[in-house]
Amino acid sequence: MRLRVMKNNAMSSANKARFVRKKGVLLEWFPASPATLYRRIREGKFPAPVRIGPGVSAWLVSELEAWAASQGRRS
């Protein structure tokens, strides 16, 4: 899986960003199994999460909205 790490200089803008954890992604954005979600990330067909803390990763809502728009889905 391709996981991006938020750098310290990006954290100030990240404080203004909205994040969604895996459960929210599976419930609201990509209703599938976790295995399917991670397979699509590996294939480059779904945005990768970012690491926002030690052992914590989440998706940027702005990236999910862009993905949804590119798929003809809600934004």
Image (cartoon, grey):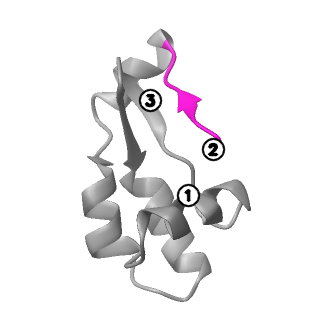
Direction from residue 39 to residue 21 in the image, left or right: left
Cα distance, mark 1 to mark 2?
Answer: 7 Å
Q: Quadrant of the C terminus?
A: bottom left
Tell me which label, 1 or 3, sits earlier in the chain: 1
Direction from residue 6 to residue 1 in the image, left or right: right
Residue extending farthest bottom? 72
Q: Residues within 10 Å of mark 2 (few under 14, many from 20)?
A: few
Residue type for callout 1: Tyr
Q: Residues within 10 Å of mark 3 (few under 14, many from 20)?
A: some
Q: Which residue is mark 2?
A: 1
Residue type for callout 2: Met
Closer-to-camera residue (32/53) = 32
For the point 50% across and 56% down, which residue is it? Answer: 63
Whether residues under marks 1 and 2 lie with C-beta atoms below 8 angstroms apart, the answer is yes
Tell me which label, 1 or 2, sits earlier in the chain: 2
Q: Which residue is mark 3?
A: 51
Magenta stretch: give its range.
1-7
Quick check: 49 above or below 66?
Answer: above
Q: Residues within 10 Å of mark 1 (few under 14, many from 20)?
A: some
Cα distance, mark 2 to mark 3?
Answer: 12 Å
Q: Which residue is mark 1?
A: 38
Residue 3 picture quarter? top right
Secondary-structure class at tag 3: strand
Residue 72 picture quarter? bottom right
Residue type for callout 3: Arg
Q: Residue 40: horizontal and vertical position, in percent?
A: 63, 65
Direction from residue 27 to residue 58 in the image, left or right: right
Q: Residue 38: horizontal and vertical position, in percent?
A: 55, 57
